[in-house]
Image (spheres, rainbow, N blue to C red):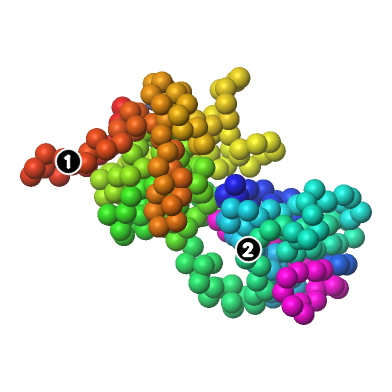
Amino acid sequence: MPEGDTLHKVAARLQGMVGQPVTRFESVIPGLALVGRTITAVEARGKNLLIWFDGTHALYTHLRMEGSWHLYRPNGPWRKPATAARAVIATESWLAVCFYAPVVEWLSAWEVEHHPVLAALGPDLLGPDTSDQPLALALQRLRADPRRPIGEAILDQRLVAGLGNVYKSELLFMERLDPFEPVGEYDDSTLLRLLEAGRKWLRRNLGDGPRKTRWDVGRANNWVYNRSGEPCPRCNTPLAMRRQGALGRTTYYCPRCQQVGAAAEPPRGRVLVRGPAR
Ligand SMILES: [Zn+2]
């Protein structure tokens, strides 16, 4: 599933096309002709990809759950059917094909800056600013709606950009947080630790190979995602899955380690601010 790490890896691979003129272009956008124009930058913002041409316009793609970008040699075989291609960009040495992306748009620089999705993006955990500033900004945005369950909030790209459904379940398990608890139940240090962990794991997964949230030798690549019914790797309680939010996204968790439902009825008259369960 494409998450922030996927898109930053795609952007890194497509850097080889920067500075090269386009020799072939096809897309689902009627009438768009780019042969002869030069690719000037390739940029990931959260889970969004922008391929800039002549510095003035960008091809914007969002992969959602089903899309992918592949990079081939110009005459190499494709690993998906040509009928699934939504954009094809060739230069002298590379051929980039975008398959199944539901969003493919051609935008001017002004339109990029005012785009309803791009302009509203929260701080990108894989953005160039590696200081604490993006984390503090994301915390501020998370705090704006304290009643929102944390498992929904960290997926909202307007609050923090880059995390997708796999990281959501994995991070909340690793940090022992209940996905269904409102953001307001957690203190700043707990939320900052969660964001920091998100950034750390996204970064670790920028190399080759499958996404891993667990690097102990000989173990599985992840803790809970897609593992409902299996024993919790920490406590052996069967892992569970519940659909969450308006989109019904799957959330995997350990009912015991993450104390799911434990704070449903706090004692009367007491404000309960939760840290992680230990
Ligand atoms: Zn457990």
| Amino acid type, callout 1 | Glu
Residue 272 drawn above or below residue 249: above
Tell me how many marks there are. Answer: 2
Q: Which residues are magenta?
A: 25-46
Instruction: Judge whether 73 appears above or below 205 on screen.
Output: below
- Category of crowding for the residue at label 1, using alpha-carbon neighbours closer than 10 angstroms: few (below 14), some (14–19), many (at least 20): few
Q: Is residue 27 magenta?
A: yes
Q: Quadrant of ligand 1?
A: top left
| Quadrant position of the C terminus in the picture | top left
Is any part of residue 136 visible from this angle? no
Residue drawn at point x = 45 percent, y = 61 percent: 158
From the top left corner, tell me how far across and down residue 276 is, in percent. 31, 34
Horizontal arrangement in the rendering, residue 231 relative to residue 82 (left or right): left
| Residue beneath disc 1 | 265
Q: In terms of sequence position, does the residue under pointer 1 or pointer 2 come before the other?
A: 2
Nearer to the camera, 95 or 228: 228
Residue 270 visible (yes or no): yes
SS state under label 2: loop
* Residue beneath the point at 47% across and 67% down: 120
Circles 1 and 2: CB atoms closer than 8 Å: no
Q: Which mark is residue 102?
A: 2
Q: Nearer the viewer, residue 269 or 202?
A: 269
Q: Residues within 10 Å of mark 2 (few under 14, many from 20)?
A: some
